[in-house]
Amino acid sequence: QVQLVESGGGLVQPGGSLRLSCAARISIASVGTRAWYRQAPGKERELVARITSGGDTNYADSVKGRFTISRDIAKNLVYLQMNSLEPEDTAVYYCNARYPELPGDYWGQGTRVTVSS
């Protein structure tokens, strides 16, 4: 019922920027809560940023002021603009969605971000 597809990862130098995109293919008309998580090697998956159906956002402390989550409701797209990237931001980034009409969480396949000189 829900398919999430991420894009936009890659290799970037410290201080650089990347924008991740997540396209949602969903069989019902719903906005839901959308989020980005990341998992670095040897670490647990962590929440990076979230945007609720009402448009409220919250961020991990480590990315506040550097990352911005946004969305295009009409296109069912969510973005993560990442600026001033640091080597510590290196991880696989996953798109997440929750819809009140559907059970559980939905995940994309992940897109790798590597910050290195």
Image: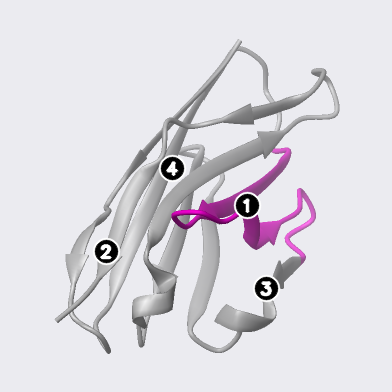
Q: Counting residues from the N terminus, which is met first, the one under dot 1 or under dot 4?
A: 4
Q: Which mark is residue 60?
A: 3
Tell me if residue 4 comes above or below residue 82 in the rendering: above
Residue 45 image offset from top left, x and y in percent: 61, 50
Q: Secondary structure at mark 4?
A: strand
Q: Counting residues from the N terminus, which is met first, the one under dot 3 or under dot 4?
A: 4
In magenta segment, residue 42: yes
Residue 33 image offset from top left, x and y in percent: 73, 44
Q: Secondary structure at mark 2?
A: strand
Viewer-nearest of labels 2 and 3? 2
Contact (Cβ within 8 Å) of mark 2 with mark 4 = no
Q: Which residue is mark 1?
A: 44
Q: Counting residues from the N terminus, which is met first, the one under dot 2 or under dot 3?
A: 3
Find the distance from the CA under tag 2 to the CA under tag 4: 18 Å
Viewer-nearest of labels 1 and 4? 1
17 and 27: which is toward the camera: 17
Contact (Cβ within 8 Å) of mark 3 with mark 4 = no
Tell me if residue 70 comes above or below residue 17 in the rendering: above
Residue type at mark 4 is Cys
91 and 34: which is toward the camera: 91
